[in-house]
Image (cartoon, grey):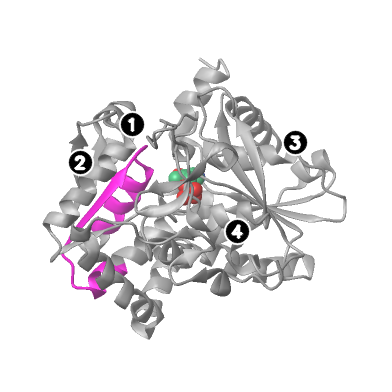
Amino acid sequence: MNNITIQNLYKDGYYGQFGGAYIPELLHSNIEELKQNYLDIIDSDEFQKEFKSLLKDYVGRPTPLYFAKRLSQQYNTNIFLKREDLNHTGAHKINNTIGQILVAKHLGKSRIIAETGAGQHGVATATVCALMNLECIIYMGEIDIARQAPNVAKMKMLGATVVPATSGSKTLKDATNEAIRDWINHPENTYYIIGSVVGPDPYPDMVARFQSIISIEMESQLLEKTNRNYPDHIIACVGGGSNAAGAFYQFIGNEKVTLHVAEASGKGIESGETAATGAIGTLGVIHGSRTLLMQDENGQIIEPYSISAGLDYPGIGPLHAELICSKRATLHSISDDEALISALNITKKEGIIPALESSHALAVLNKTTFSPSENVVINLSGRGDKDMATYLNQFNLI
Ligand SMILES: *Cc1c(COP(=O)(O)O)cnc(C)c1O
């Protein structure tokens, strides 16, 4: 376990045994084009200048690292919240879509496609397409379109075409299939923006690099507030794992930092209504990547369930599969009810209404005891505006 850094953890497209690019032959040239070019593009001065300028003036970075005084008193430790909820569009996802749209521009692509489940990634993608004046097509399951009307309206107002996926269960995995089909048919002019540290290599690495700004900022903010540039603990929720990858990135090689992964167990790990991939997932291939996924004995994907749409994913990014299996990260499976209790608590204690996803990270405070001298950073991945209907309903506020 010594000297693990993201650089020596990620080798030849794999994190340990997880990762790779398990793709149809017809996608090979698209992926190869990206693989050959992404690092040179990202490292170029021109890219860095534009990326940093947009993160600052468009997204609103750096996001604050807020010392949560009343929460700290409650849990008798030092709790800091990394305020990704304050980003433009309300979550961390925009860090990644800004990065990828710039890559698409450098590759000379004119047409952007993406798939979305709850619509959050669709909105973040439609936003940057409007910003860059690029055509935007969002694939979304027909059922999800009906469930997520406000996000569909946003995407349309931003100028995106929302295409319903009508096959299979009419949810995220069917939308992914449609997006991949589109990409195969339009390899010349189309770029596929993936929304988390998932998919075929090099997507997980590229997305982690774009989100790493979260932990890069934490280092200097912690130094200023605690006189040390690393915390004792970092807690983040994991759907595919992009906000967690960004929050962990700079600290993966520092064994003094305990990394906590909060996944959604829905109605319980054994309930059959869960998204606890880290706990019950087995090795397989999903979205072009070899990783842990929830599958039945025939290798068919089990429909995931969580109250939180962003964590409702049957796989987990290959980086996190490796961190969990090597025990570098501590896994917590958090139920719907546990997340809801923590959402209400932070709202009353700090005046911050969190996204349901982020509430799963907050719930780890009830699962682990931290000492009074320790510094604990919780990555507050998003704000709760999108979840108000669920909160009102659950807390009987209407
Ligand atoms: C999408 C989303 C997540 C889950 O995605 P990751 O890639 O695991 O970070 C978490 N929090 C919020 C607010 C989201 O919108």
Q: Is residue 164 left or right of residue 303?
A: left
Q: CA distance from mark 3 to mark 2?
A: 40 Å
Q: Quadrant of residue 5?
A: bottom right
Given this view, does label 3 or label 4 mark the residue nearer the observer?
3
Q: Which residues, given as a range, are shown in magenta?
A: 102-129
| Residue labelled with disc 4 | 64
| Residue labelled with disc 1 | 148
| Residue labelled with disc 2 | 162
Q: Position of residue 365 (x, y in %)?
A: 73, 40
Query: Split into 4 quadrants, where in the image is the N terminus?
Result: bottom right
Crowdedness near tag 1: few (<14), some (14–19) or many (≥20) residues, C-alpha within 10 Å: some
Given this view, does label 1 or label 4 mark the residue nearer the observer?
1
Label 1 is placed on what type of residue? Answer: Gln
Crowdedness near tag 4: few (<14), some (14–19) or many (≥20) residues, C-alpha within 10 Å: some
Label 3 is placed on what type of residue? Answer: Asn
Mark 1 element type? loop
| Residue labelled with disc 3 | 366
